[in-house]
Image: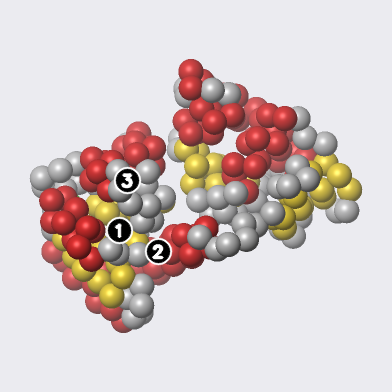
Amino acid sequence: MTRVLVVEDDPQLVRALVINMQARKFDVDAAPDGTTALRFAAARRPDVVVLDLGLPDIDGVDVIRVLRGWSRVPILVLSARRASDEKVAALDAGADDYITKPFSMDELLARLRAAVRRTATSVAPAPETVVKTDAFTVDLVAKKASRDGRDVRLTPTEWHLLEILVCNPGRLITQKHLLREVWGPSYGGKSNYLRVYMAQLRRKLEPDPAHPRYLITEPGMGYRFEA
Ligand code: CA
């Protein structure tokens, strides 16, 4: 049974979440603030954490930082905040995904299952070495991409970007993370680099580069590879 820790101070939302999750056979604990959340996380070892950013005692981003000091549990952030920099801060602190309030329960549960699946597969003994989509194939060992049976020539920078994205299917990777990984620590703000290189990757890999199906932009936040 998947154990979920819900961290949220709105009792009505907590009730709705608990009812819906229990109906789908999740084992749910609920914490109304950050202090209780950290205590429950240590004592109950949840498989996934659903975390509201606006908590009465500790800022949600700080809860993520503390959790990440000792745990790799997937964290799905609930955010009522419009400001995307709050969500980026949460992702950079180690959250795995976010969902903006108000959200549909179905979408939340789908994200939850995806987060749990990702950790389940990331501890599997044999890592994925070939990533296949209906449009293109990426061989992570041979460092080759192909489309319609033909090799696609990628520059080292394009390859590095693609590699990070396809190794994290379904996961939102922030602009800052990609820029630091590919270009270096002082390039965290150069989102125009990313736009240029992502456009090139899409031209080479996407069937319809103007309407990407696999290399998805999350405006103001980052990019996501959808297998
Ligand atoms: Ca709140």
The amino acid pointed to by label 2 is Leu
Q: Is residue 221 left or right of residue 204?
A: left
Q: Quadrant of the C terminus?
A: bottom right
- Residue picked out by circle 1: 50
Disc on the earlier residue, 3 or 1 = 1
Q: Which residue is tagged 2?
A: 112
Q: Nearer the viewer, mark 2 or mark 3?
A: 3
**Does the Cβ of the disc 3 residue fall within 8 Å of ligand 1?**
no
Task: Say which element carries label 2.
Answer: helix
Question: Which one is closest to the eye, mark 3 or mark 1?
Answer: 3
**Do labels 3 and 1 touch, CB within 8 Å?**
no
For the N terminus, the quadrant is bottom left
The span from disc 2 to disc 3 (Cα, nearest Å) is: 18 Å
Q: Which residue is mark 3?
A: 68
In depth, the one of 213 and 36 nearer the eye is 36
Residue 20 appears in view = no
Looking at the picture, which amino acid does disc 1 mark? Val
Q: Nearer the viewer, residue 76 or 156?
A: 156
The residue tagged with tag 3: helix, strand or loop? helix
The crowding category of the residue bearing disc 2, from other C-alpha atoms within 10 Å (few below 14, some 14 to 19, many at least 20), is: some
Numbered label tally: 3
Amino acid at circle 3: Arg
Quadrant of the rendered image containing residue 153: top right
Percent position of residue 159, x then y? 70, 36
Which residue: 57% across, 53% down? Answer: 169
Q: Where does the image place residue 211, in percent across and percent down from the top left? A: 66, 47
Residue 97's spot in the image, x, y percent?
41, 51
